[in-house]
């Protein structure tokens, strides 16, 4: 056994998958299979929710629910051969990259707002007239692409990482599920469709606003200029979704030692 791969440090203490501290966390989160099981898995948005700055002002950012994060981590440990450290990294990286895709979509709309005549912002129009109408269906391309972006952002993942994430996606709801086996050419095509939705060029979406021709980057170029994404400018918060404050503090101390 390579102990270096099995251990990580939390508040100066070594934590392993069999340590008393981690077993206490597992006991508190023992119902994780209700959310991550053989029939269905929760979407990554329910573990880490992105709140857009268009609607949340200075409270925008990625909000990670610590209890759900812990349950997600336990699911990885049970259903893969990854060590605790590797599982923790996979859980955190997948949540951060999925959420960052939503952030980049909003930033792209802000960039393109300079090309729109009118008061209503592109992002607000898109969320109201498209995203909210198609969420939970296979037409929700933003969620499909957010899931696919997790793969794009982590090219160093080996088969163990890829197999777990694909298995996770395969048990998620429509829209998210399609990110499971998205081919490279389909990924680029979907990004173009999503860009058309965002800037209002699809006639059948009937979006308002006059778009002028310019030299702005495509959505694909904008997204991939930001890979690897460093999360600069994206605030990340930990949310107490536990029944007791004590449980929240214990989970944070073990699972988020960098705080």
Image (cartoon, helix red, strand yellow):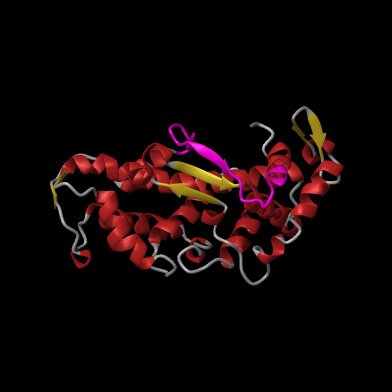
Magenta span of residues: 227-247
Q: Quadrant of residue 169?
A: bottom right
**Is 53 left, or right, of 182 in this rendering?**
left
Quadrant including the C terminus: top right
Q: Is residue 236 above or below residue 121?
A: above
Residue 157 showing in the rendered view: no
Residue 162 showing in the rendered view: yes
Q: Quadrant of residue 222?
A: top left
- Give x and y (percent) for residue 256: 67, 38
Main secondary-structure element of the magenta-colored stretch: loop
Question: Magenta span has 228?
Answer: yes
Q: Which residue sits at x=15%, y=53%? A: 209
Q: Which residue sits at x=36%, y=59%? A: 190
- Give x and y (percent) for residue 43: 54, 60
Numbered marks: total: 0
Question: Magenta span has 173?
Answer: no
Front residue (pair 182, 58): 58
């Amino acid at each position: 056994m390579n102990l270096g791969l099995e251990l990580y440090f939390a508040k100066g203490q070594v934590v392993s998958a069999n340590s008393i501290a981690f077993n206490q966390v597992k006991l508190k989160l023992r119902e994780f299979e209700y959310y991550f099981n053989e029939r269905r898995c929760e979407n990554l948005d329910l573990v880490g929710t992105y709140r857009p700055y268009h609607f949340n002002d200075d409270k925008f950012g990625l909000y990670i629910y610590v209890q759900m994060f812990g349950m997600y981590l336990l699911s990885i440990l049970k259903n893969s051969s990854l060590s605790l450290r590797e599982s923790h990294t996979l859980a955190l990286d997948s949540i951060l990259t999925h959420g960052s895709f939503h952030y980049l979509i909003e930033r792209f709309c802000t960039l393109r707002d300079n090309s729109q005549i009118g008061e209503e912002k592109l992002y607000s129009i898109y969320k109201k007239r498209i995203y909210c109408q198609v969420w939970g269906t296979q037409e929700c391309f933003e969620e499909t692409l957010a899931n696919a972006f997790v793969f794009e952002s982590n090219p160093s993942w080996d088969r163990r990482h890829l197999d777990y994430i694909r298995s996770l996606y395969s048990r998620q709801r429509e829209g998210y599920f399609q990110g499971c086996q998205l081919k490279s050419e389909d990924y680029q095509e979907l990004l173009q469709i999503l860009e058309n939705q965002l800037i209002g060029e699809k006639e059948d979406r009937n979006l308002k606003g006059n778009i002028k021709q310019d030299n702005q980057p495509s959505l694909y170029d904008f997204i991939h200029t930001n890979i690897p994404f460093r999360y600069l400018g994206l605030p990340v918060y930990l949310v107490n979704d536990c029944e007791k404050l004590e449980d929240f503090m214990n989970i944070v101390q073990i699972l988020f030692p960098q705080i």
